[in-house]
Image (cartoon, coloured by chain):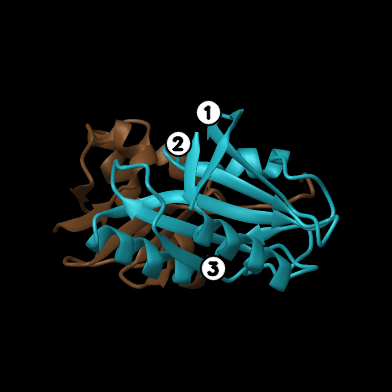
Chain colours: A brown, B cyan
Amino acid sequence: MAIEVRIPTILRSYTGGAKSVEGSGTTLGELLINLDAAHGGLRERLVDGEKLRRFVNVYLNDEDVRFLGGLETPIADGDTVTVLPAVAGGSLSA
Amino acid sequence: MLTISRDLYEKIIAHALADQPDEACGVIAGPVGADRPQRFIPMQNAERSPTFYSFDSLEQLRVWREMDDRDEEPVVIYHSHTATEAYPSRTDISYASEPQAHYVLVSTRDEPETEFRSYRITDGVVTEEPVQITE
């Protein structure tokens, strides 16, 4: 079962420069564990503990997975997962 | 150095002034690898806040896909500070993740005077750079 995962420039050091890679799993969480086997360290950049890091946006097809089920979001063959760095900031230091 | 046309420079400032007191944000796209800002894309500030900004995640997906289809990248990522100087905050630095981008900060605190400055932010290190405006 193959799911296409599109990788942003900043994380392509984990994929040997590839813009997209393939993985498998029945949930986003499983997919990221599966990807980490071939692309060690990638999952750590996306997940902190059991949650997605706030510095990244992860999309299933056209939806932000934060509005679906986060790492529990079900995925299926033929889906596309897109990772983008979140763009945010502001004058007040958090 | 950031080289930017006067037209784009003025569009960024106009957006910053129009969204006061909230922070304004957006992107200028350009051809991949050319370091030439060309296409002005104002973004919604999903926070609608005078002290924070974030791109709306779905709008960002749309815009990033469109850039990808056109072989563009974000050459400039800009936002405004409405009550502080045009210098990246710790929050700005922690989120900065486009090493090829020029991070432009506009301060509107002394409106109608505005401050327009540009930075590279790589691995948490901020380097200010000169801005050259072309006619």
Label 1 sits on a secondary structure element that is: loop
Q: Position of residue B19 (x, y in %)?
A: 71, 71
Query: Which chain is indicated by disc 1?
Result: B
The residue beneath circle 2 is B99
In the rendered image, is residue A69 in sight? no
Query: CA–CA distance between discs 3 and 1?
Result: 25 Å
Query: Which chain is indicated by disc 3?
Result: B
Q: Position of residue B99 (x, y in %)?
A: 45, 36
* Rendered view: B79 above or below B24: above
Q: Residue at x 83, y 48 (%)?
A: B84
Query: CA–CA distance between discs 2 and 3?
Result: 20 Å
- Is A37 or B29 nearer to us in this picture? B29
In the rendered image, is residue A84 in sight? yes
Query: Which chain is indicated by disc 2?
Result: B
Which numbered disc, 2 or 3, marks the residue that appears first in the sequence?
3
Give the farthest residue toward the front.
B135
**Three-letter amino acid code at disc 2?**
Pro
Total tally of numbered discs in the picture = 3
Q: Position of residue B32 (x, y in %)?
A: 28, 47
The residue beneath circle 1 is B123
Give the farthest residue toward the left.
A1
Label 3 neighbour load within 10 Å: few <14, some 14-19, many 20+:
some
The residue beneath circle 3 is B43
Which numbered disc, 1 or 2, marks the residue that appears first in the sequence?
2
Say if labels 2 and 3 share a chain.
Answer: yes
**Three-letter amino acid code at disc 3?**
Met
Q: Which-is-in-front pick, marks 1 and 2? A: 2
- Is A36 or B106 nearer to us in this picture? B106
Mark 1 touching mark 2, by CB under 8 A?
yes
Label 1 neighbour load within 10 Å: few <14, some 14-19, many 20+:
few
Question: Can you tell which mark lies on residue B33?
Answer: none
Label 2 sits on a secondary structure element that is: loop
